[in-house]
Image: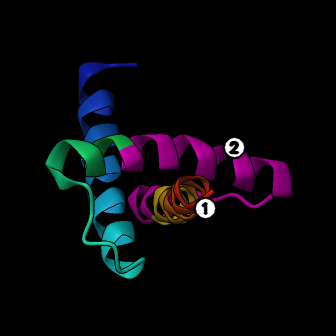
Amino acid sequence: MAANGLIWFLIIGLIAGWLAGRVMRGGGYGLIGDLIVGVIGALVGGWLFGMLGIGGGGLIWSLISAFVGAVILIWLLRVIRRA
């Protein structure tokens, strides 16, 4: 992955993690935590959408995929924390 692609991946992960933290009404996990949740969420969302055969391209699609993955990840973290 080129440096430019890595920077965009991290920016999209940060935005997706921040948005997911707001939507899930948890207040987020701080800058580093949101970045980690967003990046892992981007991987989860990309994998999930790939398994479902849903695809697209571009910046907006990447953000949507990362956001959905981050929301799922936050939900799973909260379920695990309650157990």
Q: Residue at x 83, y 56 (%)?
A: 53
Magenta run includes residue 26:
no
Q: Residues within 10 Å of mark 2 (few under 14, many from 20)?
A: some
Q: Residue at x 24, y 47 (%)?
A: 11
Q: Position of residue 65 (x, y in %)?
A: 54, 59
Side of 72 relative to 59 (left or right): right
Check residue 47 in the rendering and tell me which mark sits there, or answer none: 2
> What range is drawn magenta here?
37-63
| Count of labels in the image | 2
Classify mark 1: helix, strand or loop: helix
Check residue 79 in the rendering and tell me which mark sits there, or answer none: 1
Question: Of the residues tagged 2 and 1, which is closer to the observer?
Answer: 1
Q: Residue at x 63, y 56 (%)?
A: 83
The outermost residue toward the right is: 52
Q: Position of residue 46 (x, y in %)?
A: 62, 47
Q: Position of residue 59 (x, y in %)?
A: 39, 57
Classify mark 2: helix, strand or loop: helix
